[in-house]
Image (spheres, rainbow, N blue to C red):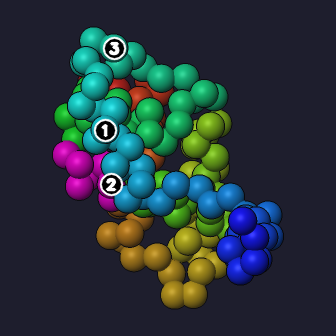
Amino acid sequence: VGGNFQKWRNKFADIGQTIKYQPLTIGDMMEEIRSRLEKIKRTEVPLFLDPKTASFIDVAIHAKVHQYLSDSTIEKHLRYARFMELHPQPVNFRNLTPESFIKHIIYRLEIEDPPATPNALHHEKKAVLMFLKAFKQYTED
């Protein structure tokens, strides 16, 4: 074996070394969540998660099982959370503090041009609440 096949094989090896790891897309996350939910029992999902170790997928599974959110709502919240995590004024979901969220909101209102709409800020707040509920940092009493 060799010739043209070997040349292509070498090209693919070179390309593979230059490609950087890309995090899961929201669609990939939703597929992973759906496949895990088919195999998991409600009693296997912890009532609350550890923010230091929980992934976005873990939070989404918690939201589906314990917060009774629909797939489309979870997907929307994950999109907003990913946006906030990668924003110039990011929100750290591993160490979620009121200060980081407030700084993010202030940046979105006062520095961004055009400023964020009230609707966008409302959805960001709902996304953060999904995480806070999973981490037992927010209750609706």
Mark 3–mark 2 Cα distance, whole angstroms, equals 22 Å
Does residue 139 show up magenta in the picture? no
Residue sitting nearer the eye, 73 or 95: 73
Q: Amino acid at mark 2?
A: Glu
Report which residue position mark 2 lands on: 75
Q: Against 65, is 44 above or below? A: above
Indicate which disc residue 4 carries.
none
Mark closest to the chain's N terminus, 3 or 1: 1
Mark 2–mark 1 Cα distance, whole angstroms, equals 15 Å
Q: In this rendering, which labeled residue sits more in front, label 2 or label 1?
A: 1
Left or right: 98 with respect to 66? right
Quadrant of the frame with the C terminus? top left
Mark 3–mark 1 Cα distance, whole angstroms, equals 15 Å
Indicate which disc residue 44 carries.
3
Q: Secondary structure at mark 2?
A: helix
Report which residue position mark 1 lands on: 35
Q: In this rendering, which labeled residue sits more in front, label 3 or label 2?
A: 3
**Disc 1 residue crowd, few under 14, some 14–19, many 20+, Cα 10 Å:** few
Q: Amino acid at mark 1?
A: Ser
Mark closest to the chain's N terminus, 3 or 2: 3
**Disc 2 residue crowd, few under 14, some 14–19, many 20+, Cα 10 Å:** some
Q: Amino acid at mark 3?
A: Glu
